[in-house]
Amino acid sequence: MTEIKYSAALTGAPFLFYESRQVARLKMNGHSQQQIREEIKTQNLFQYVTEKILTKRINTVQKRVDILDETMLKFLAEKPSETAKVINMYTIMKTNGLMLDFMVEVIGEKFEQGNLILETKDLNEFFAAKREQQENVARWSDETVAKLKQVLTRIIYEVGILADRNIGRLQRLTLDKEVEKHFRDRGEVDFLRAIGKD
């Protein structure tokens, strides 16, 4: 067994695209972390009905947005939704080991093999392998694993990789040339391969 690499945090922090875009825009306007938090709360920018999960979501989104360089921050804040969602996906992969490995080991592999159908067995095999490799994953309840499977598939659906949820049809993402070049210049080959760009 190796050290803890995975958490089940995605169950409470899914794609959060709208929220990430809000934070990216505030950050680009020179707001500090604290100012961003206050503005989200006072202006109800996330439009949540209750404040219960707000703080947790703000923490998650700030952690994700913080990994972006200035160029990617600008992409997330200003590019059309289709492109900005790819940047959002990147922030999730960079801050969540489970999402990263799922994208590289399952989705990236599918693209490389030209097998564009995601089946239930693919998710089952992925989690079975992680349960063998990681002691903490082995302790997750079946309910947690089921929820994570839902969240992973919902994220790839929201970004546009999962084109049809019923049959599990996958599609490669078309990327803005400027954005693709930036990823290549930064050496993000695994990320590009995971979204079907090789």
Image (cartoon, grey):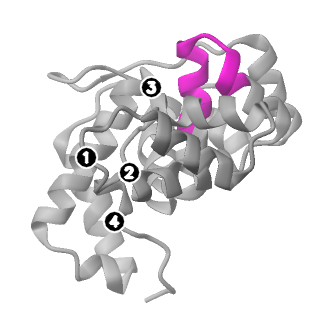
The image shows residue 106, relative to residue 70, as above or below, that is below
- The amino acid type, in three-letter code, at marker 1 is Thr
Percent coordinates x, y for residue 80 in the rendering? 60, 10
Residue 78 colored magenta? yes
- Disc 3 or 4, which lies upstream in sequence? 4
Whether residue 194 is visible to the viewer of this picture, yes or no, is no
Q: Which residue is mark 1?
A: 50
Q: Are marks 3 and 2 in contact (CB under 8 Å)?
A: no
Q: Which residue is mark 2?
A: 54
Q: Which residue is mark 4?
A: 8
Q: Is residue 128 left or right of residue 35?
A: left
Question: How far apart are labels 3 and 4 at the CA level?
Answer: 20 Å
Q: Which residue is mark 3?
A: 159
Point 48% across, 33% down: residue:
43
Residue 134 colored magenta? no
The residue mark sitting in front, 1 or 3, is 1
Q: Are marks 1 and 2 in contact (CB under 8 Å)?
A: yes
Magenta part of the chain: 75-89
Question: How far apart are labels 3 and 2 at the CA level?
Answer: 23 Å
Helix, strand or loop at label 1? It is: loop
Helix, strand or loop at label 3? It is: helix
Point 39% across, 32% down: residue:
156
Point 22% across, 44% down: residue:
150
